[in-house]
Amino acid sequence: MTADISWFKASASDTGGACVEMRRHHGTPELRDSKNPTGAVLQLSPAGLTTWLTGARDGEFDHLSHPA
């Protein structure tokens, strides 16, 4: 089994708390809103996280950061 990793956020994250934190818990990648650490946690399969990260790197979601 893959070792657990504690919650962390990217080094380029907003210092005002507007960011997403990630961890690996029991082999499952998890994400949460850093402003609400006791709130909902999104669990992804390892393959799902890889697919999402690839899409982000390839600019698939860039249009979401710009007003329509």
Image (tube, grey):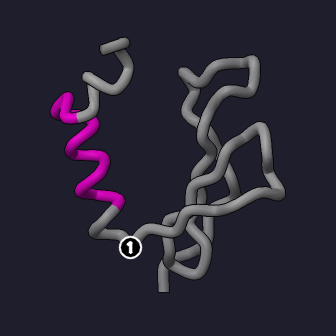
Give the answer, above or below, for where 65 lies relative to 19: above
Q: Is residue 43 a member of the stretch shown in magenta?
A: no
The stretch of residues the image draws in magenta is 49-60
Q: Secondary structure at mark 1?
A: loop
- Residue at point 57%, 27% (across, down): 11
Q: Is residue 57 a member of the stretch shown in magenta?
A: yes
Residue 38: percent from left, percent from top = 83, 57
- Residue at point 43%, 68% (across, down): 44
Residue 5 left/right relative to 44? right
Residue 19 left/right relative to 63? right
- The residue that disc 1 covers is 45
Q: What amino acid does circle 1 point to?
A: Ser
Q: Quadrant of residue 4?
A: bottom right
- Residue at point 49%, 66% (across, down): 29
Residue lying furthest top: 67
23 or 39, nearer to the observer: 39
Q: Quadrant of residue 26?
A: bottom right
Residue lying furthest front: 68
Residue 42: percent from left, percent from top = 56, 62
Residue 21: percent from left, percent from top = 62, 45
Give the answer, above or below, for where 4 lies relative to 49: below
- Residue at point 26%, 23% (across, down): 63
Give the answer, above or below, for where 3 lies relative to 23: below
Give the answer, above or below, for where 16 lies relative to 24: above
Q: Quadrant of residue 48?
A: bottom left
